Image (cartoon, helix red, strand yellow):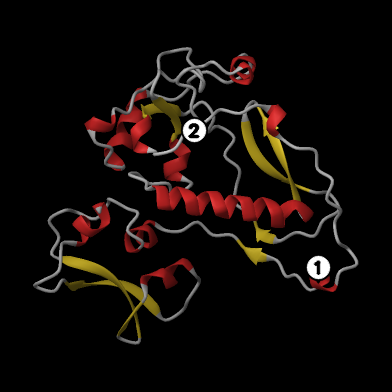
Amino acid sequence: MSTGERHEDSSLDISINLLPLKWPRETFNSMVRNFKIPDSWDARYPDEGQTAVDAPARYNTLVSYFFSAGNFRLPVTMFFLERITNFTSLKCTLLGWFEFMHCSQGFYSFVQRASAKKILWRPPKSFHDWKPKFFFMKTGMIPMKMTFRGKKDVATETIQTPFSEAWYQDLKDIPSIMLPEKALVGAGRSLFWRMEREDKPVYMEDDKVVSLYVIAFEREGGSMATIPKRADEELWYLQIVK
């Protein structure tokens, strides 16, 4: 979400009901250090009483839980954002039978339909205190426009749950897991790998190196390890930064 110019009526209406800033500056400073946010990105702690729609011109509003609970990392590329956009569109289409989109104070979420089959048997926990934990950052770090939208943008739901369809009856619920930081290291989305390290992370199964992406799944008999980089290979940190 972003409200750098505050010219949209929906943003002005929503700002009345938004929760004001409520998290310690020390916690904000710790987040900036832990996620290695450079000074040049100008992450700003808001002023007392400001809300999420009070970002200065040419600044985005971000929330700390994007990073700590959502595995979001910066810098971000257009390729990554396009993938996220396509995934979200597909998810909205497929979940129409199971959940409906809900908007509260400008924030969107999916709510399960009362009569629909559950598709997650271990749903992620809700974070009820995330909205006041926001901060501002230069728009250039996210190469697309982020607009704070209002309730007018939620379309009326008309999709009927397909109870009689054979494929619907055969659906099985699946777990929902949060990727560990080591998975983000392997995917090149984490800056936690120290710059000077001469080794790189690998996943081992039966003494063989296996693709790092497999650690996103529940597997037995494997473990994370490190191996020395080749003489002609860049430091893993530099590969991640690229």
Q: Is residue 13 left or right of residue 23?
A: right
Q: Does residue 27 appear in the picture of this structure?
A: no
Inspect the image, locate mark 1, and give the three-letter code of the amino acid beneath it: Tyr
Q: Does residue 134 appear in the picture of this structure?
A: yes
Inspect the image, locate mark 2, and give the three-letter code of the amino acid beneath it: Met
Element marked by disc 2: loop
Residue closer to the observer: 181 or 79: 79
Q: Earlier in the sequence, mark 2 or mark 1?
A: 2
Which residue is at 46% across, 66% downward? 216
Where residue 132 sits: x, y (%)? 51, 26
- Residue 168: assigned label: 1
Where residue 38 sits: x, y (%)? 24, 36
Q: Are marks 2 and 1 in contact (CB under 8 Å)?
A: no
Which residue is at 70% across, 28% downward? 151
Where residue 214 sits: x, y (%)? 43, 72
Which residue is at 30% across, 35% downward? 32
Tell me if residue 165 comes above or below residue 209 in the rendering.
Answer: above
Q: Is residue 125 left or right of residue 155?
A: left
| Residue on which the image places disc 2 | 146
Name the quadrant of the C terminus: bottom left
Which residue is at 82% across, 56% downward? 116
Determine the image quadrant of residue 40. Answer: top left
Q: Is residue 219 left or right of residue 10?
A: left
Outermost residue toward the left? 231
Q: Is residue 61 left or right of residue 240?
A: right
Alpha carbon distance from label 2 to label 1: 36 Å
Tell me if residue 130 comes above or below residue 71 in the rendering.
Answer: above
- Residue 35: assigned label: none
Label 2 vs label 1, nearer the camera: 2
